[in-house]
Amino acid sequence: MSENPHARAQQLLMQAVVEGLQPAEEAWLREHQASCAECAREAAAAQDAVRALKSVTVMAPRDLAARTQLRMRLRAEDLTRSASGSLWLWGIAGASWVLGLVSAPLVWQVFSWAGQNYGVPKLALQVGFVLWWTVPALVAAGVVLYQRMLSRGNRGA
Ligand SMILES: [Zn+2]
């Protein structure tokens, strides 16, 4: 292999985030970062982005989920009786959208960082980014509509 060491360092950096490194690879990467300011800076930036992303996806949902769950549970009991039980699914759709919105800037950071390192076309990144937070909401909305169709069918029968 005739890879240059900086390219290898960046590849290992990405690998460390996604699947972790072998001890030998980790040692090599640490050694390279000690002697290469640019790769060290890049590693720090990547770690910041990942750490920020993790703290948002852990903290925000926990708080949000706890609060919505409580509210949903309280309402669910009424709603199951009043036959419009699909309302709580609307709540999930809304919550997942809000969640996507909250994490969007950080996700974008990670995406563009990956794009720089892997030369992914900007358009592909943008599409992936948009899908990141529209798909969960669309899926939830689809489930809601499906449920409505089902309950309408049941009522007729
Ligand atoms: Zn380097």
Image (tube, rainbow, N blue to C red):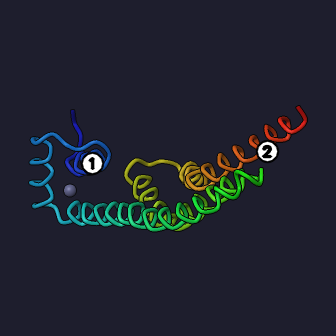
Residue 112 spot, x, y in % from top left: 45, 58
In this rendering, is residue 36 above or below 115?
below
Mark 1 Cβ and ligand 1 under 8 Å apart:
no
* Separation (CA) of disc 1 from disc 2: 52 Å
Q: Mark 1 and 2 residues: CB-CB less than 8 Å, in contact?
A: no
Tell me which residue sits at (59%, 52%) in the image.
123
Residue on which disc 2 sits? 148
Say which element carries label 2: helix
Name the quadrant of the C terminus: top right
Residue 32 spot, x, y in % from top left: 13, 54
| Mark 2 nearby-residue class (10 Å; few <14, some 14–19, many ≥20) | some
Task: Identify the amino acid type marked 2.
Answer: Arg
Residue 56 spot, x, y in % from top left: 41, 66
Q: Quadrant of residue 78?
A: bottom right
Residue on which disc 1 sits? 7
Name the quadrant of the N terminus: top left
| Mark 1 nearby-residue class (10 Å; few <14, some 14–19, many ≥20) | few
Q: Nearer the viewer, mark 1 or mark 2?
A: 2
In this rendering, is residue 89 above or below 104?
above
Q: Which mark is residue 113?
A: none
Tell me which residue sits at (75%, 40%) in the image.
146
Residue 35 spot, x, y in % from top left: 10, 60
Say which element carries label 1: helix
Tell me which residue sits at (62%, 49%) in the image.
135
Indicate left or right for 95 with 39 as reference.
right
In this rendering, is residue 73 above or below 67?
above
Tell me which residue sits at (23%, 60%) in the image.
39
For this rendering, which residue is in front, 128 or 57?
Answer: 57
Ligand 1 quarter of the rendering: bottom left
Task: Identify the amino acid type marked 1.
Answer: Ala
Q: Earlier in the sequence, mark 1 or mark 2?
A: 1
